[in-house]
Amino acid sequence: MSVLDDIVAGVRIDLAERESRTSLADLRAALADVDPPRDPMPHFRAPGSSVIAEVKRRSPSKGALADIPDPSELAQRYAAGGAAAISVLTEQRRFGGSLDDLRAVRAAVDVPILRKDFIVTTYQLVEARAAGADLALLIVAALDDDTLRRLHDDARELGLTVLVEVHDEAETARAVDLGAELVGVNARNLKTLEIHADTFGRLAPLVPDDRVKVAESGIFGPVDVKRFVSEGARAVLVGEALVKDGDPQAAVAEMTGVTA
């Protein structure tokens, strides 16, 4: 069993417990009280680099990263630094996150919010929207073609912008064929947790230029951002470097607007 398989297995166990407490029908009913989703794409398409700043307590590869007692306070600092969107890890077992973190961030900032999780069912997409998310992550490696397409369609129907994440050539082809507008290239292989620094540069040319390309993992400062922008990135998703920085507002600002 790969690391990704193990994570998804745990996600399904926790999901079943939430489904036993709240029905899909009740979740959908709650959408009536949620503000319309915010569209991050104009910011992502604007000149210079956009930053998706992540609220992330720990990871399977690095263990504990940061003590984040108040996700809303961190999110406010990200927003003040010019973050185009804020990613909130909601997976509990490996990342220490929750939907409560997402709700707290939603209440604190007006910028678009990404639910960062291992989404395998429509229920999770409705959960995301009911909690105030504007974007959702779909990881190609975790989904077969039929499920990927169905979840992509369901997310768009809910008004969510979909970040479709890829790790290799075959996954990139699947994302492009899907019509994904926002394609994230993750330098970290979720099956092995290894980082390959050349992944974005290798895969970005396979994604049409009318799509927005997002570089993920291995980003620690403006020098890294500049390299990825030169390879075609319009946005970067940064977690570890920001949560460990003593001044995340300044760190986001330094990574924002970088040109090739």
Image (cartoon, rainbow, N blue to C red):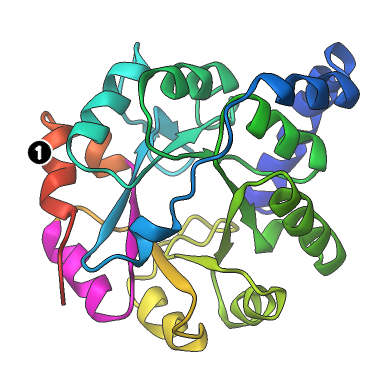
Say left or right for 166 vs 188.
right
Q: Residue at x 23, y 68 (%)?
A: 47
Rendered-image quadrant of the C terminus: bottom left
x and y, in percent, of residue 163 in the image: 55, 57
Instruction: Report the number of numbered marks.
Output: 1
Q: Which structural element holds mark 1? A: helix
Q: Residue at x 75, y 19 (%)?
A: 30
Task: Specify the segment rendered in magenta.
Answer: 222-239
Image quadrant in which you'd find residue 13: top right
As drawn, 160 above or below 128:
below
- Nearest to the observer: residue 222 or residue 67: 222
Identify which amino acid the numbered label 1 is placed on.
Ala
x and y, in percent, of residue 131 in the image: 61, 24
As drawn, 143 above or below 199:
above
Image quadrant in which you'd find residue 196: bottom left
Image quadrant in which you'd find residue 250: top left
Say left or right for 163 vs 230.
right
Say left or right for 143 vs 132.
right
x and y, in percent, of residue 145 in the image: 81, 68
- Residue beneath disc 1: 250
- Does the magenta portion include 183? no
Mark 1 nearby-residue class (10 Å; few <14, some 14–19, many ≥20): some
x and y, in percent, of residue 18 in the image: 79, 19
Q: Is residue 217 visible?
A: no
- Does the magenta portion include 238? yes
Q: Residue at x 43, y 51 (%)?
A: 40
Q: Is residue 129 visible?
A: yes
As drawn, 227 above or below 21:
below
- Nearest to the observer: residue 176 or residue 172: 176
Say left or right for 111 vs 9.
left
